[in-house]
Image (cartoon, grey):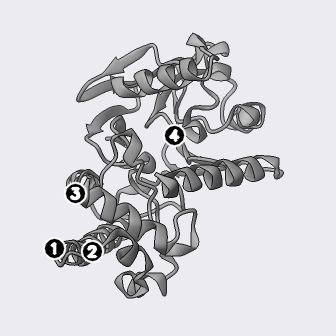
Amino acid sequence: MKNLVLFMLLLCYFISNAQKKEVTITLDLISKDIYMLTGQGGNIGVLKNEKGLFIIDDQFARLSDKILTKLKTISDQPITMVANTHFHGDHTGGNENMANQGATIFAQKNVRSRIEKNQKEKGKFNPKSLPVITFDEGLQLYFENENINAFHVHNAHTDGDAIIYFANGNVLHMGDTFFNGRYPYIDLNSGGSIEGYIKASEKALMIANSDTKIIPGHGALATKKDLESFLTMLKTITNTIKKEVDAGKSEEEVKNNTALTSVYDTKGFGDGFINSERIRQTIYLSLTK
């Protein structure tokens, strides 16, 4: 519990500091009528269609004006739909602003429940920020130029994760079930688990082919090969830590044993938000809870 409280305090500190920095919004065409927008927070997917703009995630509320301005460079049409890949604020913080623009927000059903619960606990309930359409296992959307499939992946990053596939453009948005080139943040307190995280990558690899462009929740645009390498990393470290668990090693022993992740630490996987110590501890706790 002490470690968890410390981690949450550090998380709030890093988010607070990050939000004070000037943010540059970039928009890149990655397939016909499909774009990737980066700024601060989760990567945003964009589809230009006959009804306007369909976007995946919307980062922080304070960035909405910048995001809307950048999107105007590809279309004067409004944002009509927003898909949330999960409930974390760096992916859903702009929900209210997008809803005020006329967008309909949808997500896996646990996303709405968790946003609502968090708001009520803080005494700041705001129905405009909630998804108004929810699904359980999957959802299909059909536009003139694109067919979209959203799939719920269970207990991966959270308990409400969705990966979203643009079938015609062959683009897959994975939300935070994929941190490209980095150790992932697995939110154990919100239903996440290492087993589910691995299964999410395996499901995504069943959808993707060698030409698929993959938008991670964080990190650069990726390929199937990048995701395969990421999955190998997850399985390798998990198997290594499981052996430690089976041998009766404690949480502290695993957390402090740098040899368990050294191969990937040298490749820079621990240089992101989740360092090597934290990923060892997270996987240990996921395997033993």
In this figure, which residue is indicated by the disc labeled 1?
A: 246
SS label for mark 1: helix
Residue nearest the observer in this picture, 259 or 30: 259
| Cα gap from disc 2 to disc 1, whole angstroms | 9 Å
From the viewer's perspective, is residue 225 above or below residue 184?
below
Residue type of the residue flagged with mark 4: Asp
The quarter of the displayed image where residue 106 is located: top left
| Cα gap from disc 4 to disc 1, whole angstroms | 50 Å
Identify the residue at horizontal 28%, vertical 36% (top origin).
152
Q: Is residue 248 left or right of residue 141?
A: left
In this figure, which residue is indicated by the disc labeled 3?
A: 202
In this figure, which residue is indicated by the disc labeled 4?
A: 33
Residue contact between numbered discs 1 and 3, judged by CB atoms under 8 Å = no
Residue contact between numbered discs 4 and 1, judged by CB atoms under 8 Å = no
Residue type of the residue flagged with mark 2: Ile
Residue 25 image point, x, y percent = 73, 48
Residue contact between numbered discs 3 and 4, judged by CB atoms under 8 Å = no
Residue 99 image point, x, y percent = 61, 16
Q: Is residue 283 left or right of residue 85?
A: left
Q: Is residue 181 visible?
A: no
| Cα gap from disc 3 to disc 4, whole angstroms | 27 Å
Identify the residue at horizontal 70%, vertical 52% (top origin).
13
